[in-house]
Amino acid sequence: MTTRAIGTCEVLSMSPNIIPNYMLEHAEFGLEMAKHVTIKQECSIEAMVANFTLEPADRLRTLLKVLLLSYDKPIVDDQWMKIPLDLTNEQYGSVVNLTRVSVSRLFSDWSAKELIRKSGRNVFVRSELFKDIYDWV
C-alpha cells in the first residue's frame, strides 16, 4: 500500500482478515464500513472534479472550507475562524495543484480584503471568503 501525508502521522496496520471477519460477525459494522467506503470514493471523485474544473482561487477557498467543516469547526458570520491545520503555502498548493507562489498571492489578495489573516502558519478566515462558492460538501 502507498499513501501520502501532508505532515507527520502515525500509520497503524493489522492482519488483512481482521476487518472482514469482524464485518461478518457484526452486520451493523459492515454497513458502516460500506457507507464509509462509498463516501470516501465520492469525496475522491469530487476532489478530482474540483481540481480539474474550478479556478485556482475557488480550489483554495473550497479546501479552506472543507478543512473547517471536516474538523467540526462551524462557519460563523462576523468572526475569525482558525483553520485547524497549520500548513505551509507549499502544502496548501500541493493539495489543490497550485504553486507556493500562487497560494501566497491569493492569501495576500484576500488579506488586503480582510477575508484572511495569517500568523506564522496559523490561518484565520472570515465567512465572507466562502460567499458564492459551490458547496462540494
Image (tube, rainbow, N blue to C red):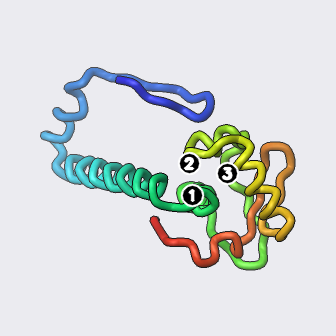
Query: Closer to the camera, 29 or 11?
Result: 11
Badge 3: residue crowd in 10 Å (few <14, some 14–19, many ≥20) = some
Q: Residue at 38% of width from left, 49% of height from top?
A: 44
Ranked by sequence position, the earlier of labels 1 and 2 is 1
Residue occupied by mark 1 = 59
Residue position marked by numbered label 3 in the rendering? 84
Residue type for callout 2: Val
Q: Position of residue 40 (x, y in %)?
A: 35, 50
Q: Is residue 53 above or below residue 2?
A: below
Question: Is 71 situated above or below 10?
Answer: below
- Which of the pair 30/55 is nearer the observer? 55
Q: Quadrant of residue 117?
A: bottom right
Nearest-to-viewer mark from 3 and 2: 2
Q: Is residue 104 left or right of residue 52?
A: right
Q: Quadrant of residue 133?
A: bottom right
Please report contact status of discs 1 and 2: CB closer than 8 Å, yes or no. yes
Type of residue at label 3? Pro
Q: Position of residue 121 (x, y in %)?
A: 79, 44
Depicted 60 relative to depicted 131: above or below: above
How many residues crowd mark 2 within 10 Å: few (<14), some (14–19), many (20+)? many
